[in-house]
Amino acid sequence: MIARICFGLVLPVVAVAATTMSAAPSAWAQTIDPRREYAACMAESRSNPKEGFDRATQWLGLGGGDAARHCQGASLIGMGQHEEGARRIEALAQDVKANPVFRAELLAQAAQGWMLAGKAQQAEATLTAAIKLSPEDVELYVDRAEARAQHGDFQGAVTDLNFVLTRDPIKTDAYVFRASAYRQLGKIDLASKDLVTALELNPQHVEALLERGMLNRLNGNNAAARRDWLTVIERAPNSPAAETASRNLQQMDGNTAGAPKGKAKGK
């Protein structure tokens, strides 16, 4: 979901912003290229979100309209004010005069903020609203599956991922994510089947190897679990998957009771 705060919304929002620029109160405002200003503001929302927020606020006062509001929300999320950023982007999605697909994308961005704020159920509700606007966007279902898994609704996550895989039967990440949800539900055979498919599609997929290591550990095959986790660390040493694999190895080597748990893996 992180990638949703990006440049993908430049054209529709700038079109709205451009209609408000003629009312800007200064000569400087009248010379602003909305497309360029929006791209620069969104870039700053990621590289230096405090400056991005200040820039967006100034632009909003000069007639930046919905483009400036979007940059404000993205900057707030970048600053760690996840809930406020989510709230503002969700409000923008409700207000903006744009096509349903575009509004759904804004809601998906808001849902990212809710997730980062630790409000997975609010994220789920926001994504449900997005799906009503854009029911064929499989990425919205993947995002909602992540939100559902985060608040413990693993069966709901499986339902969403079933839909995704009927539309895109070679989406490796969805098989891995569904395997993780099946593991949490205790459906080990189904989880194993999904991981076989995922690794047939992409033998180098580190999240699939991480998850297979967890299943091997659950099945008491510590040697196989170790091989999988060491492979993850070797292939992607600086990744979150490698961090989890290292932690699981330490837990296993320390004879910690029980198999490693872990959140259902997302995209």
Image (spheres, rainbow, N blue to C red):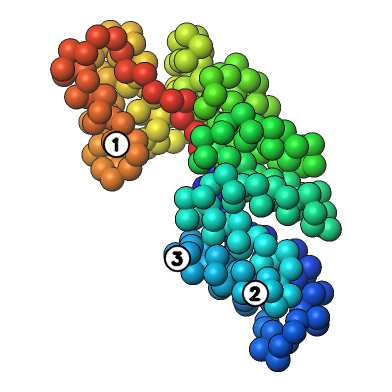
Q: Residue at x 69, y 66 (%)?
A: 67
State yes or no: discs 2 and 3 in contact (Cβ < 8 Å).
no
Q: Residue at x 19, y 24 (%)?
A: 250
Element carrying mark 1:
helix
Nearer the camera: disc 3 or disc 1: 3
Whether residue 67 is visible here, answered yes or no, is: yes
Q: Residues within 10 Å of mark 1 (few under 14, many from 20)?
A: many
Frontmost residue, 162 versus 259: 259
Question: Which mark is first along the chain, 1 or 2?
Answer: 2
Occupied quadrant, residue 214: top left
Nearer the camera: disc 2 or disc 3: 2
Whether residue 138 is visible here, answered yes or no, is: no
Residue beneath disc 1: 242
Numbered marks: total: 3
Residue type at the position of mark 1: Ala
Q: Residues within 10 Å of mark 3 (few under 14, many from 20)?
A: some
Question: Which mark is first along the chain, 3 or 2?
Answer: 3
Question: Going by the picture, which residue comes out furthest to the bottom?
Answer: 27
Element carrying mark 3:
loop
Say the numbered circle drawn on residue 59.
2
Frontmost residue, 144 versus 200: 144
Q: Residue at x 34, y 35 (%)?
A: 241
Residue type at the position of mark 2: Trp
Residue type at the position of mark 3: Asn
Residue 203 in percent (x, y) is at: 39, 34
Q: Residue at x 29, y 9 (%)?
A: 258
Residue beneath disc 3: 48
Residue 86 in percent (x, y) is at: 61, 47
Left or right of 68, for residue 192? left
